[in-house]
Structures are given as structure tokens and as C-alpha cells.
Image (cartoon, rainbow, N blue to C red):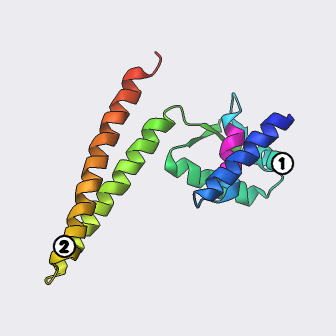
Amino acid sequence: MSDAKDEFVEMMGRHFEEEGVPRIAGRLFGLVMLEEGDRSLDDLAETLQVSKGSVSSNARMLENWGLLERVTRPGDRRDYYHVAHDMTERLLNRQIERMQLFIGRLNQHRGSLDDLSGTPAARFDEMVRFNTLAIESLRNLAAEVVRSRPR
């Protein structure tokens, strides 16, 4: 890789790490962002100079988040990865699902806290209200992303 690509991959690693995500996940995503096609776990591990197991577990995490997509090839037992073509929609939908889950948990526990009133009750209401508004905004953003996608 060129110096500029190395710097980008390392910057992505630091950025993800600042967000509480393993640095290798950021480096992996940065590397795959720069690629046109699919990359095998072996190739990714070699390029990043880390273990295949580390690349595999972080690739699965990024796949679960919707950033990467795993593909297979007939007659080849290896897994290959590329950036998911609809990663922005997947990220938005994942965030919406997480917020909906949070609202459900807040509501479930608020119902079981019989003596909840005053400021603590207002905190619960504010968290539900905030997350409900955020979900609405994220749904609008997701719809705009789909509408504005080049055909």
C-alpha cells in the first residue's frame, strides 16, 4: 500500500478506537473501503499484519453492523468481504432498531417501578421522547438516502 493508504487505514483504526470499537475493526474497514473488489480473510490479515482470527471476529462484527458484506465463491471455502453497497441504510436501520429496543426497555422497567415520580419519571419520559424523535429523524434520513442514491 502507499503511504497515503496506510495513513488512512491507521486513521480509521484510531477513529473507531476513539468511538469505543476495537482499533483493528477500524483498520479493517478502512482497508476494505479502499478496495474495488472482495478480499479474503487471509489477504486482509496479511495486509494488516494481524491474526486471521482477529480479522475474522472484527469482520463479523462489521458485518453485523451492516458495514461489510460477506460473500462466498463456488468451490472456495474461504470467506470474502467488501463494503456493503447499502451500508448507510443498514447503519441507519440498525440504529433505529437499537433505539426502539432502548425505548422498550425503558417502558418495561418504568412500569415495574411503582414509586417512580417527579424528576426520575421526567427523565424516563425525556429519554423516550428523545429516542422517539431521533427514530423519526433517522427514518426520514434513510428515506432521503434511498431517494438520492445514484441510479
Label 2 and label 1: CA atoms lie apart by 53 Å
Magenta residue check for 27: yes
| Magenta-highlighted residues | 26-32
Q: Residue at 59% of width from left, 53% of height from top?
A: 60
Give the x, y percent position of residue 148: 41, 21
Magenta residue check for 100: no
Q: How many tags in the picture? A: 2
Give, as a three-letter code, the residue at label 2.
Ala
Q: Nearer the viewer, residue 76 or 128?
A: 128
Q: Residue at 19% of width from left, 73% of height from top?
A: 121
Whether residue 122 is visible to the viewer of this picture, yes or no, is yes
Give, as a three-letter code, the residue at label 1.
Glu
**Up-down: is 121 above or below 12?**
below
**Up-down: is 9 above or below 128?**
above
Name the residue that disc number 2 marks.
121
Residue 93: which disc? none
Residue 46: which disc? 1
